[in-house]
Amino acid sequence: MTKIAFLFPGQGAQYVGMGRDFAEHYPEARQVFEEADERLGYRLSEIIFEGREEELRKTERTQPAILAATIATLKVLENNGIRPAAVAGLSLGEYSALVCAGAMEYSDALPVVQKRAKYMQEAVPLGQGGMAAVLGLEHEEVLKLCRQSQAHGCAEPANYNCPRQVVVAGHREALEEVCRLSREKGARAVMLSVSAPFHCRLQKPVEDKMAAVLEEITLNRPEVPFVANASGQYLSDPSEIKLSLVKQVSHPVLWEDSMRLLLKDGIDFFVEVGPGRTLTAFMKKIDKNVQALHVEDLETHERFLRHLEEG
C-alpha cells in the first residue's frame, strides 16, 4: 500500500497568483485566505492574488503568504480524503506541516510566522547578509570552504538540501568568498535573491523572541509523524517541537537527512503541497526512483488524482 508524505515549501517558493484558482473553485480554500486577511488585519489575499512581486517578496509578507497558499492547497487535498502518513516542511514550511499534523492551529500559525519573518529580517542590517547556493561539492567540502572564508565574516551551511547541494548563509563578503572558492573547485555557486541570512548564527538574537512568541500558543501532539528540520528526526512532544522551532532559525536545515528517514520508514510517495516544485526536485536527487509530485493549482491537483487512480 502506498505511504504518502506531505512536504511543505519554504520562503522563495512564492509567486503572485499562487492559490488563486483553488480559492475561486473551492470554498474551503477561499476560507483559508479570508481567515488570513481577518487574522492579520490587512488584505494579504490581494497581495497574493494580484499584488506586485516586490511587495510579495518582502519577508513579512512572504512567510504568511506561503503559509496561506499552502494550507489552502492542503484543504483541497483533505476534501478529497487524502491524508499523509508523515509530514515535513522546509524552514517556514515546518509551520504548514504542523498545521497539517493537527499540532498547531492555522489561526495561531499566521501571526507567529509574520513575527518570525520580522525578527529574522531585523537580525542583520539590510544589505549586509545573504545566502548562496553551492552545487557540485560534498557537504564536508562546503563546510571547509566556509571556514576558509571566516576572515571576511560569518559563512555557514544553512540548508543541506540534497546530495552535492548546500545553501550557505552569512555576511555577503564571506559568501562571495565561498562562491569564489567553490568555482575554483569546479562547482557552481550563486548568490540567492533573499533579503536576510537565514539558519546561521547571525540569527541567534531571534531565538529568545521566537521562544516568547511560541510560549503564547498551544501545541498538540502531531496526529501523524512529523520530522523536524533541526535534527532530521521525529518529534512528538509539544515542548520539544517548540524548542526545535526556536533552534531552527539559527541552525542548518537537515532536509536530506529528514527525507532519508522517511524513505527508511517506508514512505514511497512524496507530495509537495503548495507553491513551487523545489522539494520535488530535491527528492528526485535524493532518490531518483521514488515517486514525487507537486500540487499547487487545479492542473497539478488533477494530475495527482489521476496518478492515484492509476495507482
Image (tube, rainbow, N blue to C red):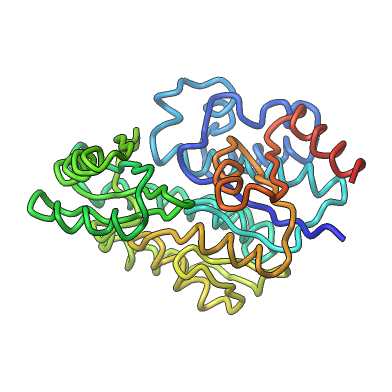
Determine the residue located farthest toward the right in the rendered image. Answer: 309
Q: Which residue occupies the foreground of this view, 29 or 304?
A: 304
Looking at the rendering, in which quadrant would you find the N terminus?
bottom right
Q: Which residue occupies the foreground of this view, 244 or 146?
A: 146
Q: Quadrant of residue 306?
A: top right
Determine the residue located farthest toward the front in the rendered image. Answer: 186
Please report the residue visible at 69 percent of the width from the left and 50 percent of the height from the top. Answer: 290
Please report the residue visible at 40 percent of the width from the left and 24 percent of the height from the top. Answer: 54
- Is 177 on the left or on the right of 213, as rendered? left
Count of marks overlaid on the render? 0
Task: Where is residue 185? Give x, y as percent.
Answer: 25, 43
253 in relation to 194, above or below: below
Q: Which residue occupies the foreground of this view, 231 or 76?
A: 231
Task: Where is residue 154? Give x, y as percent.
Answer: 18, 54
Task: Where is residue 66? Give x, y as percent.
Answer: 55, 40
Q: Which residue occupies the foreground of this view, 166 or 61?
A: 166
- Is 137 on the left or on the right of 276, as rendered? left
Please report the residue visible at 46 percent of the width from the left and 30 percent of the height from the top. Answer: 56
Please report the residue visible at 61 percent of the width from the left and 52 percent of the height from the top. Answer: 287
Task: Where is residue 226? Give x, y as percent.
Answer: 62, 67
